[in-house]
Amino acid sequence: MSVTPEEVARLAALAELAVKPEELAALTAQLDRIVGFVEQLGELGDQEGAGRFVAGPDAAPLREDVVRPASLAIPPRDLAPEFDGGFFVVPKLGTLEGEG
């Protein structure tokens, strides 16, 4: 299997990476070497009863989703010049125009 520049560009876009066109050829060659190496690992097959290597656990245990409040070093109330009802109080837009 070989990696194409189009596949590398698509992966970069999915990962939200800015890849310059002049970098695409080098990245394609690097990724192609990595994929080739991984393919070689699959060719090893069964080594004296060890079985085929599969990365990762057979089944990953899921943890319960628990919403916890974030523990901040400084509470937002202490950062705000004015704080009311859980919200930062800011001046209306336009009230600072003409000052300075």
Image (cartoon, rainbow, N blue to C red):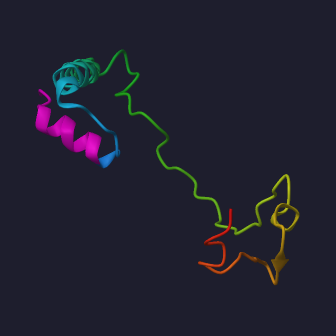
Between 8 and 73, the one lying in front of the other is 73
In the rendered image, residue 2 lying in the magenta stretch gets the answer yes
From what the image shows, is residue 18 above or below residue 47? below
Horizontal relation, residue 9 to residue 14: left or right: left
Residue at (75, 77) in percent of width and height: 89
Q: Count how many numbered circles sit on residues in the image.
A: 0
Residue at (69, 68) in percent of width and height: 66
Please give the range of residues in magenta.
Answer: 1-13
Magenta: main secondary structure equals helix
In the rendered image, residue 21 lying in the magenta stretch gets the answer no
* Percent coordinates x, y for residue 36 in the rendering: 21, 20
Q: Quarter of the image containing the N terminus? A: top left
* Percent coordinates x, y for residue 61 in the rendering: 58, 54
Between 55 and 45, the one lying in front of the other is 55
Horizontal relation, residue 25 to residue 18: left or right: left
* Percent coordinates x, y for residue 34 in the rendering: 27, 21
Horizontal relation, residue 91 to residue 46: left or right: right
Q: Quarter of the image containing the C terminus? A: bottom right
State which quadrant residue 17 falls in.
top left
**Farthest right residue?**
78
